[in-house]
Amino acid sequence: MIPAPQISVQAIAALQLGNKIEAIKLVREATGLGLKEAKDLVERYLRDHPELQIELSRRNGAIKSFLSWLFMMAVAVAAILYFWPRG
C-alpha cells in the first residue's frame, strides 16, 4: 500500500495564517499532485484539524467584513462627489 502524501510544515503554517490557496500551492510543489488532489488533501487535513478550520473561517469572515466596509465607504464617497454642489 502506498502511503498518503503528507502536508508540509510550510503548508500548515499557511493554513494557520488563513491562506488556504497558498497551502494548496505548497502541497502541489512538495508532492507533485494535481490541483484537485492537492485541494482534497488540504481540505482533508482541515477536516481532521477543526481548530484550523475555525481559524480559517474567522479570518475569512474578517476579510469579508473589511471588504464590505471598504465598498460602503467607496459608495459613500462616490455619492458625496456626485451630489457635491458645483460652483
Image (cartoon, rainbow, N blue to C red):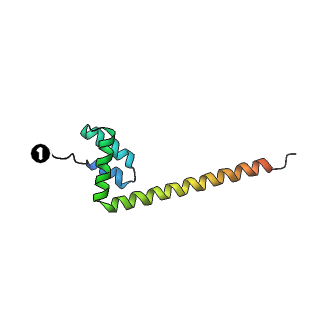
Q: Quadrant of the N terminus?
A: top left
Where does the image place residue 72, in percent across and percent down from the top left? 64, 54
Quarter assignment of residue 38: top left
Where does the image place residue 43, in percent across and percent down from the top left? 32, 51
Q: On the picture, is 26 further left or further right than 80?
A: left
Q: On the picture, is 57 further left or further right than 85?
A: left
**Residue sitting nearer the eye, 59 or 40:** 40
Whether residue 56 is situated above or below residue 22 in the rendered picture: below
SS assignment at label 1: loop
Where does the image place residue 31, in percent across and percent down from the top left? 24, 40
Give the residue drawn at x 34%, y 59%: 52
Quarter assignment of residue 49: bottom left
Give the residue drawn at x 44%, y 57%: 59
Q: On the picture, is 44 further left or further right than 67?
A: left
**Residue sitting nearer the eye, 41 or 51:** 41
Give the residue drawn at x 54%, y 58%: 65
Query: What is the tally of numbered marks visible in this picture?
Result: 1
* Residue type at tag 1: Met
Where does the image place residue 10, in percent across and percent down from the top left? 29, 47
- The residue to which callout 1 is attached is 1
Whether residue 63 is situated above or below residue 38 in the rendered picture: below
Q: Quadrant of the C terminus?
A: top right
Toward the left, the furthest residue is: 1
